[in-house]
Amino acid sequence: MVQHVDNHRNGAEHEITVERNSKLFELIGEEKVISHCNHHQIVDILGKNMRVNCRDNKGMVHGIESFEENTWIVAVQWHPERNHDEINARIFKGFMEKCRMYKKKKVFFNQTSE
């Protein structure tokens, strides 16, 4: 993790390029978006089975995700739930839909047959 990145606090606006082959792109359907970043840290080294899904115009990572087919992890460096526009609504709605799907799957697999 890179600490204390300049110009990444207090809702700083950044143009973000989203990778077309990413889960994030599947959610929002846009290659260029504006983020309002509230963080001063960015990802430096990716964890196992993770990939970058978006960057700003300086190449700084603004989002990561799992690339495993059966794992849904999508993370962005801003708060979609705080930004009231269509792009962020798609991210938040997609997250909520995955939560509902997970809950149904978990309930289904935890049922016992009698």
Image: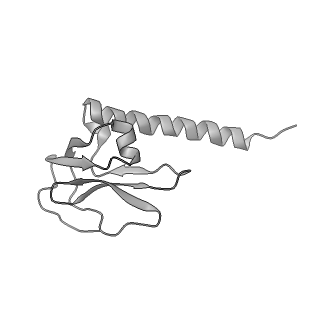
On screen, residue 4 versus residue 109, left or right, reads left
Q: Residue furthest left?
A: 7
Percent of width and height locating residue 37? 20, 49
Instruction: Give the color scheme: rainbow, by chain, secondary structure or one colour.
Output: one colour
Asked if one can make out residue 91 in the rendered structure from this viewpoint, the answer is no
Quarter of the image with the C terminus is top right
Can residue 54 be seen in the rendering of this structure?
Answer: yes
Quarter-of-image position of residue 57: bottom left
Position of 70 compared to 73: left or right? right
Label total for image: 0
Where does the image place residue 17, in percent across and percent down from the top left? 23, 48
In the current view of this chain or complex, which residue is farthest to the right?
Answer: 114
Q: Determine whether 96 is above or below 52 in the image.
A: above
Does residue 40 appear to the left or right of 24 in the view shown? Answer: left
Provide residue 113's location: percent of width, then percent of height.
Answer: 84, 38
- Asked which quadrant contains residue 25, the reply is top left
Using the rendered view, name the quadrant where residue 30 is placed. Answer: top left
Pick the residue in front: 90 or 21.
21
- Of the pair 113 and 48, the residue shown nearer to us: 48
**Coordinates of residue 5 in the picture (x, y in percent):** 17, 63
Which residue: 24% across, 68% down?
A: 2
Is 66 drawn above or below residue 30 in the view shown?
below
At horizontal 24% and vertical 62% (from top left) the residue drawn is: 41
Q: Nearer the viewer, residue 20 or 81?
A: 20
Q: Residue at x 54, y 35 (%)?
A: 100
Quadrant housing the N terminus: bottom left
- Figure check: 74 above or below 42: above
Q: Judge whether 59 appears above or below 75 on screen.
A: below
Instruction: Decide if residue 86 is on the left or right side of residue 58.
Output: right
